[in-house]
Amino acid sequence: MSGFPVPTMPAPPVSVVGLGQLGGSLAAALAGAGRPVSGWDVDPAARDAAEDQGVRISQELTGVVVLAVPLPVMGSALTGLRIDPGATVTDLGSVKVPVLAELGAAHGDRFVGGHPMCGTERSGHTAVDPALFTGARWALCLEPGTDLRRWLRVAEIALSVGAEVVPVTAAEHDDAVAAISAVPHLLAAALAAAAGQAGPLALSLAAGSFRDGTRVVGSDPAFVTALVEGNAGPTAAALDRVRAQLARPWADLVADGHAVRTASAGRRPVRVPLDRTALLALGRAGGAVTRRLAAFVEGWVPEGA
Amino acid sequence: MSGFPVPTMPAPPVSVVGLGQLGGSLAAALAGAGRPVSGWDVDPAARDAAEDQGVRISQELTGVVVLAVPLPVMGSALTGLRIDPGATVTDLGSVKVPVLAELGAAHGDRFVGGHPMCGTERSGHTAVDPALFTGARWALCLEPGTDLRRWLRVAEIALSVGAEVVPVTAAEHDDAVAAISAVPHLLAAALAAAAGQAGPLALSLAAGSFRDGTRVVGSDPAFVTALVEGNAGPTAAALDRVRAQLARPWADLVADGHAVRTASAGRRPVRVPLDRTALLALGRAGGAVTRRLAAFVEGWVPEGA
């Protein structure tokens, strides 16, 4: 694309609270890029690991404050820390409606909910990888009350570590991740549990399709339980859609699943004005933001969208 | 283990019919090990690819004849080929009761059903990999009427390409693979189809858990449909067990699935007499054969079995 990119990207300091796999990876990626980044974790070992990656350890939070803690402690993660009243607050939690309710109440329009779609079945500071976000989609919530300037500040952080930003509402996000994250975790658990019932012979014959289908069952059960129970309504609805699929003739089901999985991943570049409606339309079309220009963001949509 | 291994392994010639991913990989692995191996495929391109791997192309089948063709053409694969009347016939098909009914009727006790638990979502001669069987389990059917000497001849071929042999009955095999292969394929298809219903935003946010959970949906739909419809009874029963799991409280389900997936893979070596009952008990315990001695096979069972 031609264009005249304007260097309008501000680079506010970033303060990451929670230095496990996601938070530690983000802090390490930003530190590696020479960005001012501080971090805090209740676990001294996680703090030491982050410090080794060039992250300044501090309980003073300024700029963009990233809450990278498990969902059950999201509301209490800032207790005892000092936060600049002008700071923008974002999170990396895997559900957004409940987090928005809790943190939106606490921080008002200073809060912008986010969810990078990466992370593995590993967790904790020993699973930190500064390249974790490269090429990942990062859902970023644009509610009616979201301050667009703060949204862009968080988006810029996501872009700077190699992610692509998907504008969504919290409700859209939770419906989508129910289908592509919560339900896969439940299906994998059910598959493993049922194979366990089938006995040692079945488990000994288990090969590629079983191993792939159950890899995520290796995730911390507390994390998975929070993921599904924290998004119970959309997850139950998405699970019902899977149940309905399983009741179809198998040949039809297999053909349709194959068609979805192998559909073209073609994309075409677009330029979208810095406007909530236009940005959300980009996300709904399956597209993402890749760069901010002066009054636009640059991104892509799927071919044909 | 101590012992006095006796070089009783015969090395009969092997004739592979069907030179796609499984058959072509087996023929290439045997040729690479200096074994006498011939092959045949209706597709000239598959024959040329096998010849490049050192496989002699021939329509004369002797020694151990391996049927490595899709299930729907298993019964007609030998039409037009010349087979030595003393040859042992085996197959690599993913269901065993229907194949046993068809090929057992045609070949009597010369037939030994088999199923190596490997292969990927790719198929055809371009997906050939001589290392495909290394470390794989290879189910080998021991029916009441199976000739144990012929069973050992086929087992020796599996061992020689790096697989471990799991003695099973055809019915036990079909129940087990319903749980660990047919059902994973159906769940993956349902997951992909339901995500397709959820729309472009959901698919654009799909990350690790969805990609892993749907990888096998990339397999040829005709192969998957044959796999599930050819094993319809056990597959329906295994799918019902998964449905029952999905109806449990999510936290319990996630914990149980995690426990199955992360259970110890410890093993202890065993020596098992060349006896159908003892061999099948080894398979039922989740163990496998790794070597043949004079009057025993050597293998392993899970710790505690």
Image: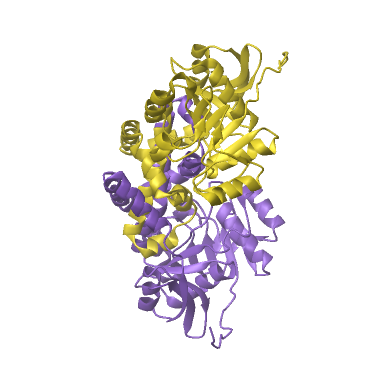
Chain colours: A yellow, B purple
With B273 as the anchor, is A26 left or right in this view?
right
With A170 as the anchor, is B11 left or right in this view?
right
Instruction: Examine the image and state in which quarter residue A157 appears.
Output: top right
Q: Is residue B246 visible?
A: yes
When the figure is inspected, residue B101 is found, relative to residue A284, above or below; the finding is below
Q: Position of residue B263 (x, y in %)?
A: 41, 61
Residue at 64% in and 60% down:
B28
Q: Position of residue B280 (x, y in %)?
A: 37, 72
Q: Position of residue B126 (x, y in %)?
A: 63, 48
Instruction: Examine the image and state in which quarter residue A301 appears.
Output: top right
Q: How many marks?
A: 0
With B282 as the anchor, is A26 left or right in this view?
right
Q: Is residue B58 visible?
A: no
Q: Position of residue A98 (x, y in %)?
A: 37, 30
Residue in front for this viewpoint, A72 or B130: A72
Residue in front for this viewpoint, B130 or A147: A147
Assign the N terminus of chain A to one quadrant of the image. top right
With A136 as the anchor, is B302 left or right in this view?
left
Residue in front for this viewpoint, B115 or B253: B253
Residue in front for this viewpoint, B75 or B269: B269
Residue at 55% in and 36% down:
A16
Residue at 66% in and 65% down:
B31
